Image: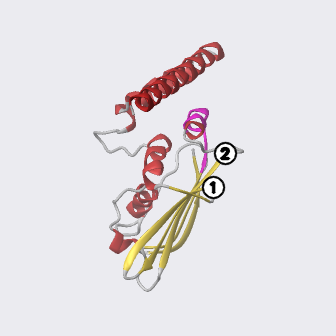
């Protein structure tokens, strides 16, 4: 769940911090006041291109920051562990710091102050936020996401069984790889 969003020197916004509460959170305002920019900033945080790079940084500034704090679910924690990302608590801080270097906009992405690749954040973002319009939703088109919803609603015994199967499958693949490597070495 998104808990906090901080935007600094992003396009029209000098600085804003939004604390989200459990339940429905609503943005209201006049046309052009930045409501869509707030949503687009979340897209940009996860490597999206809703805000073009040449408009990302506020005019007259050299850098901008998009930072979000999430409370993670067991499903997201498992994804992070599967990708060698240990999170000591349920708090996830994701940042995109963009700056001008040699007349180009360069972005650095971090997860709890540790550098991560944009591709990884893109995958993680699809688990944390689902952007939906009137006639679309992206997350529910993901077979992996739907399978994990079912897995998470099962009993502890079922989750343990799934974990054991995954571990056995990984061991099987490791053994296959070892056999292939030994086979390649004997041919040489």
Picture quarter with the C terminus: top left
Disc 2 to disc 1: CB gap under 8 Å? yes
- As drawn, the residue found furthest toward the bottom would be 60
Q: Is residue 78 magenta?
A: yes
- Would you say residue 149 sits in the magenta stretch? no
> Alpha-carbon distance for marks 2 and 1?
8 Å
Above or below, 26 against 63 in this view is above
Location of residue 9 in the rendering, given as x and y in whole percent from the top left corner: 49, 75
Residue 11: percent from left, percent from top: 41, 73
The span picked out in magenta is 70-79
Q: Quadrant of the N terminus?
A: top right
Q: Which residue is mark 2?
A: 87
Residue marked by disc 1: 112
Side of 24 relative to 21 (left or right): left
Give the number of the disc on residue 143. none
Count of marks, rendered view: 2
Q: Secondary structure at mark 1?
A: loop
Q: Quadrant of residue 73?
A: top right
Observer-nearest of 150 and 176? 176
Nearest to the observer: residue 62 or residue 185: 185
**Would you place residue 121 above or below residue 159 in this image?**
below
Vertical comparison of 72 with 43: above or below: above
């Amino acid at each position: 769940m998104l808990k906090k969003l901080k935007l600094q020197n992003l396009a029209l916004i000098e600085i804003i911090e939004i604390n989200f509460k459990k339940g429905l959170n609503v943005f209201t305002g006049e046309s052009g006041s930045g409501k869509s920019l707030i949503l687009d900033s979340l897209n940009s945080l996860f490597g999206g291109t809703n805000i073009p790079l040449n408009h990302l940084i506020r005019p007259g500034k050299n850098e901008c920051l998009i930072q979000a704090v999430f409370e993670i679910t067991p499903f997201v924690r498992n994804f992070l562990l599967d990708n060698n990302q240990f999170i000591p608590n349920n708090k996830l801080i994701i940042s995109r710091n963009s700056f001008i270097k040699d007349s180009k906009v360069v972005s650095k992405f971090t997860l709890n102050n540790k550098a991560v690749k944009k591709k990884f954040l893109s995958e993680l973002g699809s688990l944390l936020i689902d952007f939906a319009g009137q006639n679309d939703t992206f997350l529910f088109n993901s077979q992996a996401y739907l399978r994990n919803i079912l897995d998470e609603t099962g009993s502890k015994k079922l989750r343990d069984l799934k974990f054991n199967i995954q571990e056995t499958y990984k061991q099987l693949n490791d053994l296959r790889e070892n056999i292939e490597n030994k086979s390649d070495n004997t041919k040489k």
